[in-house]
Amino acid sequence: MYGLDAINAYNGWAISVVGVTIVFTGLVTLSMAISQLHKLLDLWENRKELSLFKKKSPATDQPLVAFTPGQKESSRQFKLLAETLNDHFSLPRLLKLAQISGIDHPHATLATLLEADIIVSDTQGYHVLDMARFNTLVS
Amino acid sequence: MEHLFVDFFQNTGFFLCDYRNIVMILVGMTFIYLGIAKDYEPLLLVPIGFGMLMGNIPVFHGLGLGIYEDNSVLHYLYFGVTQGLYPPLIFLGIGAMTDFSTLLARPVLMLLGAAAQAGIFITFLGALALGFAPNEAASIGIIGGADGPTAIFLTAKLAPKLIGPIAVAAYSYMALVPVIQPPIMRLLTSRKERLIRMEEPREVTKREKMLFPIVAFLLCCFLAPAALPLLGMLCFGNLLKEAVVTERLAVAARTSIIDSVTILLGVTVGASTQGDVFLTSQSVGIFFLGALSFCIATACGLLFAKFMNLFLKSKINPLLGAAGVSAVPDSARVVQVVGQQEDPTNFLLMHAMAPNISGVIGSAVAAGVLWSFMS
């Protein structure tokens, strides 16, 4: 048997198409795999940083700043002082009032309140007190 | 006493000689000449050529001298060919001497190695159309992979009677890569395309190189398990090389083992080309189809590279497609030579090694696929 008859009889077309497809699939898969290999290795080599990141991420729901009892007391006094001012108050003025009132470690306490996002900037040059956050972290 | 002389004379090669033995001896001498004088694949052509001389000394059948006689020494050595032992050992050595860096740096070039394997399947169809049985057609088609050990391995499994002509055709065309490929490369590419410069490949880490043989082996062999003997040994050899701690084994694989096996393979394949067995119309058909297969594989690689350029931002030099036929590293060298004929400062060799090596993997997978279809 010769010619197209032979090819048809021995299923030549199907064998060729499937064969080429398998070879292509194999090499395409391999090329995709090895193109990602260096990225996977980078991830593996930086796995410590990744694990630190993973440990940090759940902590976003928890207080980033831990208040000592003394800091909590000072923070409550800062809150009272802030309430005597406008809603949007000047930070230097609040600090000056705190110093006049004799609050312990006014600079450190103010820094902690800023760090804990209890006192936040209104982006206009003044600051506001986030009561919800104050209640969560200090009260 | 006269009777003894007559008996002796009747057992000599001069008396038993056939014109086919003379033809094959001349072919063998041509191989030796090409290997030594022209430096065409000397490590293959010289053993095969001398094997042809050994196989075509006319001998009295029954003395246990011929390669096809059960109790002959040559027959025992030929066992490694007929049972497919030698090709995996050669792949072990190839793996132990191959650096996959360029492939890892630009994996997209692997597709060129895949495209060139289309020649195998197109030739398979051609061989069927010319009246060859499917198993023979598959063995002939694999010549297009331009990978001698793969061709021998598949033929040993599917059509052992054709090992001689197929092995000789495969190695002849591999040796003739510098002659066969350049005209096709020039025909299918424009000067502008041949001038394309390749981007510098990124640096590849040692860990990547170590992981590659494991990943490649698992992926390819899960997909085409019949490629296991060849790809397994290729990847194992490469792991020995890249692992560093197994340097002794890698050195053995890429020197003493591959050299010993190449000698045995070359001589026995050459010896298997006995004139009365080799010089048939079938062999002529195999040589014709083998050449066709090689040309189609080269063209497929080149055309696919041009096709890829339609989509790639950073264009690739389409000459690299010709290296997809494996024939490591000759076809990569040819790419370098043809590229430098247009621009002597354009260095393509390093880039051409990527499709060249993927061609080895691709032809092994293709052989595995054909074996699984035919068995």
Image: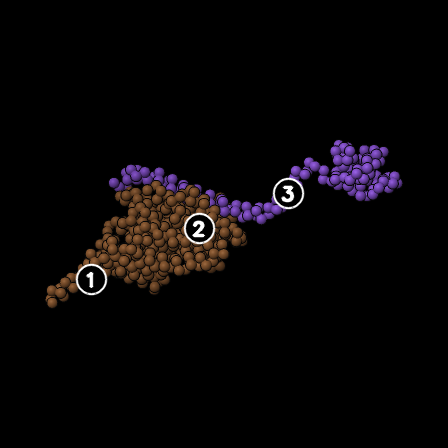
In the depicted view, which residue is nearer to us: A3 or A9? A9
Where residue B332 sits: x, y (%)?
43, 55
As shown in the figure, which amino acid type bears the numbered disc 2?
Cys
The C terminus of chain B appears in which quarter of the rendering? top left
Measuring from the top left, give residue B180's x and y in whole percent.
36, 54
Q: Residue furthest bottom?
A: B1
Position of residue B194 measured from the top left corner of the image (x, y, whole percent): 45, 53
Q: Mark 3, mark 1: which one is toward the viewer?
A: 3
- Chain under callout 1: B
Q: Amino acid at mark 1?
A: Gly
Q: What residue lies at 79% left-to-right and 38% top-to-bottom?
A: A69
Residue A8: horizontal and vertical position, in percent?
30, 37
Look at the numbered disc 1 and give the secondary structure of its residue. helix
Mark positioned earlier in the residue sequence (2 or 1) = 1
Q: Which mark is residue B13?
A: 1
Left or right: A103 as drawn, with respect to A52: right
Q: Amino acid at mark 3?
A: Phe
Residue B116 visible in the displayed image: no
Residue at 18 percent across and 60 percent down: it is B16
State if disc 1 and disc 3 touch (CB < 8 Å): no
Dot 2 corresponds to which residue?
A: B235
At label 3, counting other C-alpha atoms closer than 10 Å, the crowd grade (few under 14, some 14-19, many 20 or more) is few
| Number of on-image labels | 3
Is B90 displayed left or right of B128 in the figure?
Answer: right
In the rendered structure, find residue A53 and report the number of the disc placed on it: 3
